[in-house]
């Protein structure tokens, strides 16, 4: 059994993730006024209409293409030696240190302690009607799954087929897919937890919500 509390302490020791900013396409790069330590904001708005902090511009075929921060945080590194040079797509330009929010910490813990049942192919996924009804009425944690249980309907190219759950017996603690949206192959559909561990995990989740201090 994973030591959830030790995992939380590990995250506290490094409460951030480092996001590498890469050139999305070829072009001549010119950085905006960012330096290590500069705070940046992410793109926001209901439709992503509010751009984040401008990091750089890539000039391609006499057109300037802006590159905005995709995450809130602090700039940790800027490849200033690339200023004014032609770069290929995928070239690292900067690193942003993104400090984890409470929800991100909880998500990180759950992804490590739960059994993640993953999508076998890119498709749309739905709970079978009996499970869907139970989830809507009482939440996913009211559903106990067992190996060999028919759990999902897979919808792809107007064809539907059942998907059998394979994994340990337990309750559905987290749901990662949304109706009518394609799920990539390998992406988690649900996170399953042995019933004996639910109170321990919930205690840690509650502790994060109460005590976690968000960074920059």
Image: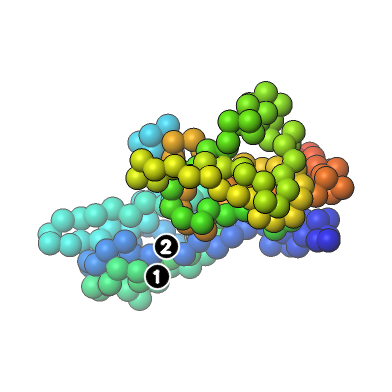
As helix, strand or loop, the secondary structure at mark 2 comes to strand
As helix, strand or loop, the secondary structure at mark 1 comes to strand
Residue to which mark 1 is pinned: 92
Percent of width and height locating residue 87:
27, 72
Q: Choose between 131 and 41: the one closer to the eye.
A: 131
204 displayed left or right of 55: right
The number of numbered badges drawn on the structure is 2
Percent of width and height locating residue 154:
48, 44
Please tell me which residue is depicted at 24% across the width and 54% down the height of the picture: 65
Instruction: Tell me, yes or no, if residue 56 can be seen here.
Output: yes
| Residue 109 drawn above or below residue 206 | below
Locate the N terminus and report the quarter of the image it occupies.
bottom right
209 displayed left or right of 56: right
Please tell me which residue is depicted at 40% across the width and 70% down the height of the picture: 92
78 displayed left or right of 109: left
| Label 2–label 1 contact, CB within 8 A | yes
135 displayed left or right of 203: left
Q: Check residue 21 in the rendering and tell me which mark sits there, or answer none.
A: 2
């Amino acid at each position: 059994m994973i030591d959830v509390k030790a995992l939380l302490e590990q995250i506290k020791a490094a409460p951030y993730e480092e996001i590498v900013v890469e050139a999305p396409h070829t072009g001549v790069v010119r950085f905006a006024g960012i330096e290590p330590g500069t705070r940046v904001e992410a793109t926001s708005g209901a439709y992503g209409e509010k751009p984040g902090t401008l990091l750089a511009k890539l000039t391609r075929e006499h057109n300037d293409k802006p590159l905005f921060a995709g995450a809130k945080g602090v700039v940790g590194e800027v490849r200033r030696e690339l200023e004014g040079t032609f770069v290929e797509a995928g070239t690292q330009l900067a690193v942003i240190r993104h400090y984890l929010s409470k929800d991100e910490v909880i998500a990180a813990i759950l992804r490590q302690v739960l059994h993640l049942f993953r999508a076998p192919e890119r498709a749309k996924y739905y709970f079978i009607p009996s499970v869907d009804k139970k989830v809507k009425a009482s939440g996913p944690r009211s559903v106990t799954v067992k190996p060999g249980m028919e759990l999902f309907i897979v919808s792809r190219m107007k064809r539907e087929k059942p998907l059998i759950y394979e994994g340990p017996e337990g309750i559905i603690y987290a749901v990662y897919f949304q109706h009518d949206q394609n799920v990539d192959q390998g992406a988690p559909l649900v996170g399953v937890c042995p019933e004996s561990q639910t109170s321990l995990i919930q205690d840690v989740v509650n502790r994060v919500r109460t005590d976690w201090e968000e960074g920059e």
